[in-house]
Image (cartoon, rainbow, N blue to C red):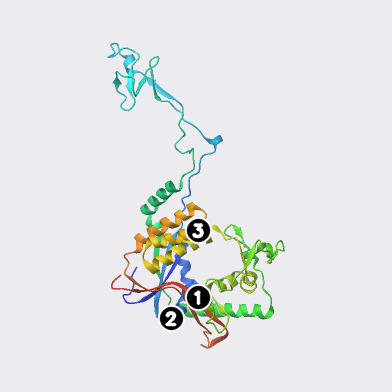
Amino acid sequence: MYLTPGAVYVVEHKTSSADITPGAPYWKRLRLDAQVSNYQVGVRAMGHEPAGTLYDVVGKPTLVPFKATPVEKREYTKPRDKSCPECKKKAPSYPAPHVFDVETNALIESTRNGVVCVDGRIVTDPGGKLYANLRERDETVEEYRMRLRLDIGTNPDDYYQRGVVVRLAEEELDAAYDTWTTARQLRESELSERWPRNVDACDQYGSFCEYFDVCSGAASIADPIRFRDAEEHEELTPATTAKKRLPLVTTSSLKCFRSCPRKYFHRYVQRRRPLASTAALRFGTLVHVGLEVWWRTGDVYAAVDAMRAKGEPDPFELVKAEELLLGYHVRWIDERLEVLAVEEEFVAALINPQTQAESRTYQRGGKIDALVRIQGAA
């Protein structure tokens, strides 16, 4: 991976359960990723010319905590014995019954720590032990931590990958047309007050959209048990949204609209968000909290403390995040990067790529994880 000394790069970090090794489909998808293109615009609004995006991906552990084997499925070893070698001799060294050391299986005089032959047989294994692939108790948090730490240390490339994503001029132009066209479709929905449902997006990755019951008439968007009021762009601070002259479109909001206009309507027009969040979303947010502190301070222990303060209710999920962050620190702490900004927000004009005129309907907005300058050779 070559980085241009003195150049400015966006840093974007993600957590993923997909294969993140070089050449995997995950990296191919980034060639068209709208977020990367949007960041080019945002960084220029901050006064920098970006050389590219350092795409930092942290692989989610696939190791799960071991659970105790159900009682009805437990199996135990059977007793084992063998013929007493002394009893077979015509002239034994010691009179029967013979005693053998349990560690060395050598003949001894004392019965202390020894196994006595009975009727010419020696018990080599009393049995009653649970088979090695079965467990009598759940794995503890610390046992899981050590197992996970060993796996991360042994297979770091499965957990940490950093790639450089660049945008050529023609690629930026294509992305600009994509954004402009989506914004026009969004405006058409606003003007017509019609928000079509994309039924192909109702069931993805093994679960239904959080608004499925609302769209199908089985629930109300006003239900306070299932949904809460929300800001339009919760990823942005009020100080940033106050700077806007026009409504903002962000990478997240446009992605939502492309996925399903009706979902956009519930999230960004009605501003109702689900109270319950998925485990994947909670974990990604937890790691993001730690990475923000790490990029600000370089202090991995302060970053771990920040994640603990977040209050993750599942101790095993917290351990996953902690161990990933510790490994991230070891992996990248020696990189020669000057941090220029962390969690920097921006508001920029939405430009018509055909006429270069600014939109009179929307502005672009977003937040950049980090901005860095390369120091010396990398």
Q: Is residue 122 visible?
A: yes
Residue closest to the eye, 77 or 204 = 77
The residue type indicated by label 2 comes to: Met
Q: Which mark is residue 311?
A: 3
Q: Which of marks 1 and 3 is in front?
A: 3
The single residue placed furthest to the right in the displayed view is 217
Give the quarter of the figure containing the C terminus. bottom left
Q: Is residue 112 left or right of residue 310?
A: left
Q: Which of marks 3 and 2 is in front?
A: 3
Where does the image place residue 46, in percent across and percent down from the top left? 43, 81
Q: In this view, does 124 lie to the left or right of 73?
A: left
Quarter where residue 10 is shown: bottom left
Where does the image place residue 72, in percent across and percent down from the top left? 56, 35
Residue pointed to by mark 2: 46
Where does the image place residue 214, in percent across and percent down from the top left? 68, 64
Classify 10 Å Cα crowding around label 2: few (below 14), some (14-19), many (20 and above).
Answer: few
Q: Which residue is drawn at 59% across and 57% down?
A: 206
Q: Which residue is drawn at 50% across and 58% down?
A: 311
Quarter where residue 204 is shown: bottom right
